Amino acid sequence: MSASDPQRPPVSFPDALSNREGWLEPFSWYRTMRSESPVRYDDERELWDVFRYEDVKHILDNDALFSSDPANMPGFEEEVADSEGAPPPVFDTMLFADPPEHGRLRGVVDEFFQPRAVREQAEQIQQLTEQYLDEITAGEFDLVSELAYPMPVDVIAMMLGVPTDDRAQFKTWSDTLIERPTAQTEAEMEAYQQRQRETQQEMSQYFSDLIAARRAEPRDDLITAIINAEVEGQQLSEREMVGFCTLLLVAGNITTTNLITNAMRCFAGQPGVLDELRAGEATLSTAIEEALRYRSPVQALFRVTTESVEVGGREIPAGEGIVAWLGSANRDGAVFDRADEFVADRQPNQHLSFGYGTHYCLGAPLARLEAKIALSSLLERFETIEPVDTDLKPIRSSFIYGVEEYPLQVQ
Ligand code: HEM
């Protein structure tokens, strides 16, 4: 994981997943880990890995023992510092804050992401989707670049109040920010870190300018709401505002792209599923939940122990980094029957793909709506949808799971 990753502190990749095959299908490695070393310390990464559902859920449900603030990990701040010696603004957001600070920050935007508020966006999301689909003619197209990526970026840009013309720029920024270092030499590593820092700075500058523009001329958008928000009688600092915008943009973009693509991989990649959906034998909403479980867009979350604590029979000292493997928890046979099968009508489905507890994904209702609109529109437009036989390339990130391109043949 990159040193200045927007969502996660520095967590390098476990060896077993560092090749293409490993990261395309990490599930057999998870299975081995769940049975052989469900809680383990990795000397190389100097981190703990946790694989079983109950342990992962327990960690996410206990903020006091398992903090989301990476500053609790010695050496963290120096590692992610920018040229001014401070961590990038995104580390000042709710994602990296523990209660009570967490609630203060989340409260600023909570109402915009409640299911009712999100439903009001449905018409515009549908229109955007139709525009992208109009560009696709029968034959072959890439689901990622032609719908699954641009649509969620447009939606969050629209909600924030960012001009959609800047979309291509956002893609470049977010791609760089989730990039995993593949550097072999010190010079290559330095170049990678430099690229990361520059991207963070460009993005921060962009949002600072936009904040200044909205201060001068307020509008009915999320950026204006963030500027006007008062928490305990005080406005957010400029740094907090920039961090907020960055978080919403990045958190809501790559994740949803991969939900749409991974869901289509589940539907089109397994004979009979698209027919089941068309015939109403499984509802799309239920099948999307199963896609979230089966190919979780976020595979891993990071926490830091605040005191010495036991997990799954192992004693973890204070100040240690823990990787809670959602992707593994979601395949745990102790919780899910036929855990390694995609079961389109699976119910109940208590997957952990949006996290659990205090930090449960703010954007879950929006992501579900976007995925439903994108996938139902595709099913409506095209009578046949088939994956093109090609070598899939995994996304270069150590916590986001998906493929760079997903070509489909449609009629
Ligand atoms: C399929 C799409 C998505 C997935 C799989 C996903 C996954 C997650 C997960 C696992 C967390 C928990 C992080 C933690 O506990 O450390 C989270 C938090 C968060 N997500 Fe999402 N997310 C998605 C879409 C979105 C969207 C569309 C938005 C907003 C536009 C968003 C905004 C956030 C925010 C702000 C948080 C932090 C919440 C907090 O700290 O209280 N996410 N997301």
Image (cartoon, helix red, strand yellow):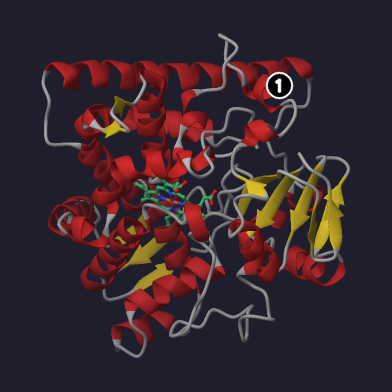
Q: Is residue 320 left or right of residue 264?
A: right
Question: Relative to 139, is 151 above or below?
Answer: above
| Residue beneath the point at 37% across and 25% down | 242
* Image quadrant where residue 326 sits: bottom right
Name the one closer to the observer, 32 or 144. 32
> x and y percent of residue 287 in the render?
41, 76
Name the one closer to the observer, 149 or 139. 149
Name the one closer to the observer, 103 or 39. 103
Q: Secondary structure at mark 1?
A: helix
Q: Disc 1, ligand 1: is the CB inside 8 Å?
A: no
Name the one closer to the observer, 193 or 243. 243
Q: Quadrant of the N terminus?
A: top right
Q: Is residue 356 left or right of residue 306?
A: left
Asked whether residue 142 is in view, the answer is: no
> x and y percent of residue 293 in the render?
53, 69
Amino acid type, label 1 = Met
Q: Which residue is mark 1?
A: 189
> x and y percent of residue 259 in the render?
43, 59
